[in-house]
Amino acid sequence: MHFLDQAKIFVKSGGGGPGAVSFRREKFIEYGGPDGGNGGKGGDIVFVAVPGLNTLIDFRYTQHFKAQRGGHGMGRNRTGAGADDLVIEVPVGTQILSEDKEEVLADFTEAGQRVVLLEGGMGGRGNASYKSATNRAPRQHQPGIPGEEMWVWLRLKLLADAGLVGLPNAGKSTFINAVSNAGAKVGDYAFTTLVPKLGVVRHKGREFVIADIPGLIEGAAEGAGIGDRFLGHIERCRVLIHLVDISGDDPVEAMNIVEGELAAYGAKEMGGLEGKPRIVALNKVDLADADLAAAYSAELVKAGAERVFPISGATGAGIEALLDAVLEYLPARTATENPGHVVPEGHEHDAEDEKPWDPLG
């Protein structure tokens, strides 16, 4: 499946149906009168966030979405049928932006979230509704209120708990393959990752989602390399894992380059990434001795890193300690990880020692 995280689409709600102009023509009815019914309501444009989607590729081939018009009113005071709403399914994490991308119209952060973006037009009044003591045979009616229309941008920001950042060839794909089920492409050349990848990590009875984005190079904020457009996918992460290659020319400079690009992105985007917690992982320590890894770790801390973990994505060395650190930034165990049982506050140790009930004692 191709990955697409931005799409521009046209949406239009349905117009209201016109009211009817009708008069009774029945045998043995001495006085007829108006009996034209009202028109039906037009369909709404509704967006719904659904699980299982992680791309906007469907909107590359279908860009126009128009809801149906309401039914027209009819004689015998029959109201026109209301049109069905047009439901558009989007992945969780999608934002709907105005055409100029200046305003966020909707933000889908949970599965099942439903937003009525455009309401259908109300149906027009039939001539029966105009009848009065002084207007016994009205012939006026309303055509129905037209639907609303607009161009909008859909922007997908993948939802993940932890995000991987680093220079190209820092070992991010190898790392995410080692800790999750991502199956990312690995190669001995730059930019093996061209689109974001998600993986589910299972560690010490916990599960969390990790996101790998294409590598950043100096000048990415100005469009160098792949640019920084994919940084939006880690805006919602609780913690960033910054992989630094110990076999590079200067690991400290490598860290500073990426941090500079994150800071530049933070200046452009509301919220940004500057204040997000970081864990620095000194990767590929299997290619260096322990003394060199310790020396580089000290230099990275001196350069501003809060925590540095020497690891090897290829051999698995140090990864367990790194994942332990990631868990510290995640919320408490969720209901899906501990189904059917809620641990009262202050009794966590009791839950750990709890055993299933045995009728034989």
Image: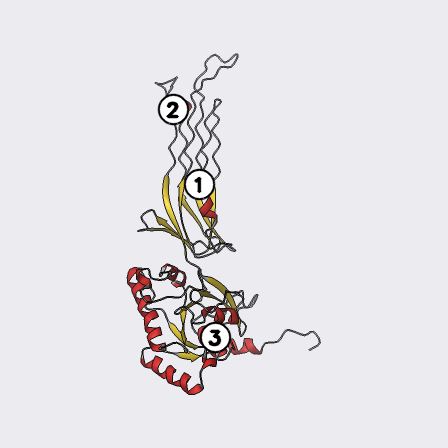
Q: Closer to the N terminus: mark 1 or mark 3?
A: 1
Front residue of 306/60: it is 60
Residue 37, numbered circle: none
How far apart, in angstroms, are the residues tagged by discs 2 and 1?
29 Å
What amino acid is labelled 2 in the image? His
Counting from the top left corner in percent of width and height, residue 182 is at: 52, 65
Q: Residue at x 47, y 41 (%)?
A: 86
Residue 141, numbered circle: 2
How far apart, in angstroms, are the residues tagged by discs 3 and 2?
69 Å
Q: Which residue is mark 1?
A: 65
Counting from the top left corner in percent of width and height, residue 341 is at: 56, 68
Front residue of 204/301: it is 301
Asked if residue 57 is positioned above or below residue 134 in the image, the reply reads below
Q: Residue at x 41, y 58 (%)?
A: 157
Q: Residue at x 67, y 74 (%)?
A: 358
**Element at badge 1?**
strand
Asked if residue 298 is positioned above or below residue 133 in the image, the reply reads below
Asked if residue 277 is positioned above or below residue 38 in the image, the reply reads below
Residue 323, numbered circle: 3
Q: Closer to the N terminus: mark 2 or mark 1?
A: 1
From this viewpoint, is residue 193 visible?
A: yes
**Element at badge 2?**
loop
**Element at badge 3?**
helix
Between tags 3 and 2, which lies in front?
3
Front residue of 146/159: it is 159
How far apart, in angstroms, are the residues tagged by discs 1 and 3?
44 Å
